Image (cartoon, rainbow, N blue to C red):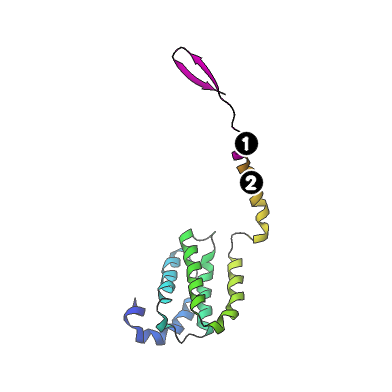
Amino acid sequence: MCTVEMPDIMIKLLPALIVKLTHISATVAMASPMLEFLSTLVRLPHLYACFVAEQYVSVFAISLPYTNPSKFNQYIVSLAHHVISMWFIRCRLTFRKDFVQYITKGLRSNALMPFDDTHDTQSSFRARSTSLNERPKRYTHTHTAGSHDCSL
């Protein structure tokens, strides 16, 4: 809130604050406030106009652990991806090429499973879905007086 209400003071304090935020553990309790702060901050470009590469790397370092779907819920993981993409888009073009490897390495390390190991998972999905392709069993109708029972 102070970033909006006291922008002149926050412009001076924000670079050091962002670096200090990297020392806070990525916990479920801290996920939403941290990511929502960064999501709000990215919409106030006058506050981070003087950021250098170190501050942008700090933003990515804060956000990347929250992309782990085994530790955080879908909202947090989605918000983390949003924060990373928005900060990447808003950073200076000269910085972007230097951040690509750092971001992709962080995203890969927090992925639920490596991309190469999806074969086993995909085959189990296919095995479960083959029952949908089977022809349905035919029902025989036995008609008795006043009864409409169906049996296999």
Residue 86 or 112: which is nearer the viewer? Answer: 86
Amino acid at the residue labelled 1: Glu
Badge number at residue 134: 1
Residue 7 placement, left or right of 110: left
On screen, residue 82 above or below 121: below
* Eye-nearest disc, 2 or 1: 1
Query: Range of the magenta residues?
Result: 131-152
Residue to which mark 2 is pinned: 126
Q: Quadrant of residue 42?
A: bottom left
State which quadrant residue 6 falls in. Answer: bottom left
Task: Assess disc 1: are there few (<14), some (14-19) or many (≥20) residues with their C-alpha within 10 Å of its C-alpha.
Answer: few
* Label 1: element kind: loop
Q: Which amino acid, by three-letter code, is at mark 2?
A: Arg
Residue 56, percent from left and from top: 51, 80
Q: Which quadrant of the figure contains the C terminus?
A: top right
On-image quarter of the N terminus: bottom left
Please tell me which residue is depicted at 54% across the width and 79% down the height of the picture. Answer: 57
Residue 75 is one of the magenta-drawn residues: no
The stretch drawn in magenta includes residue 137: yes
Q: In which quarter of the view is residue 114 placed?
A: bottom right
Where's residue 90, x and y in %?
48, 78
In the displayed structure image, the side of residue 112 where residue 47 appears, left or right: left
State whether residue 40 is above or below residue 55.
above
User: Is the Cβ of the residue at disc 2 closer than 8 Å to that at disc 1?
Assistant: no
Residue at the outermost left position: 5
| N-terminal label among 2 and 1 | 2
Q: Is residue 73 visible?
A: no
Q: Residue 87's mark?
A: none
Observer able to see residue 120: yes
Residue at 60 percent of width and 43 percent of height: 129
